[in-house]
Amino acid sequence: KNSIIYNMSSIGIFAQGSKVYGENVLITNCGQHLLALNIGGSYNFRHCTFANFWPFSRQTPSIFLNNYYEDIYGNSQNRDLVQASFGNCIIDGNNEIEILFDKSDDADFNYNLNHCLLKCTEEYWNETWLNSNSQGTIILTNNKTTDFIDYESNNFELQPYSIAINNGLESIAQEVPFDINGVSRTKTPDIGCFENNN
């Protein structure tokens, strides 16, 4: 809760078959993934900002989810992804697609993005990974941006005209009524870990 992880050469949070809850978390600028949720598990993130503007070459997405691994004999071992829930979260970065679902059909693969900003192509989301349980999510494409104040200096607060302003779901905000700076967000909440109170 209320945590910042940044400038990691590899991965911000690496979880394997784990159970993780996060609220008001900012993870930014990692050489591979901000968040790698591997070999199933149960994950719940509320009002988090995942923004990967790593200044060097990066081929990997900000967030990676999967539900299996390959053992030493080359056999696939499947583990249920019980849930990967993101509510009022920002998933952004300088890659065209900032989330990757690596799915085995032999285990559960449950995810939900509810009132999030997500950097990916509309084709990727709509044709490949559209989940009917994901509601209110805004797809960030080349003509849409989150409009952070200054990501180059690690300021991920929101500009007053950001698309994240007032677009969060109030019922999720009531679970996390104050932002990372202690600002109230229960009415017309912003998406991400920062509430713009201007």
Image (cartoon, rainbow, N blue to C red):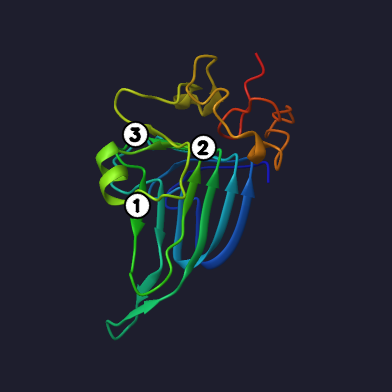
Amino acid found under the numbered disc labelled 3:
Asn
Q: Nearer the viewer, residue 181 or 138?
A: 138
Q: Regarding mark 1 in the picture, which secondary structure is present there?
A: strand
Q: Residue furthest bottom?
A: 73
Amino acid found under the numbered disc labelled 2:
His
Q: Residue at x 52, y 17 (%)?
A: 159
Residue 152 x, y percent position in the rendering: 44, 25
- The CA distance from mark 2 to mark 3 is 21 Å
Q: Regarding mark 3 in the picture, which secondary structure is present there?
A: loop
Residue 112 x, y percent position in the rendering: 48, 51
From where the camera sits, is residue 58 visible? Answer: no
The disc at residue 94 is: 3
Q: Residue at x 31, y 38 (%)?
A: 95
Residue 190 x, y percent position in the rendering: 59, 28
- The CA distance from mark 1 to mark 2 is 18 Å
From where the camera sits, is residue 100 visible? Answer: yes
**Residue designated by label 1:** 100
Q: Nearer the viewer, mark 1 or mark 3?
A: 1
Amino acid found under the numbered disc labelled 1:
Leu
**Residue designated by label 2:** 115
Q: Nearer the viewer, residue 36 or 4?
A: 36
- Is the C-beta separation of discs 1 and 2 under 8 Å? no
Q: Is residue 176 above or below residue 43?
A: above
* First in residue order: circle 2 vs circle 3: 3
Residue 109 x, y percent position in the rendering: 42, 64
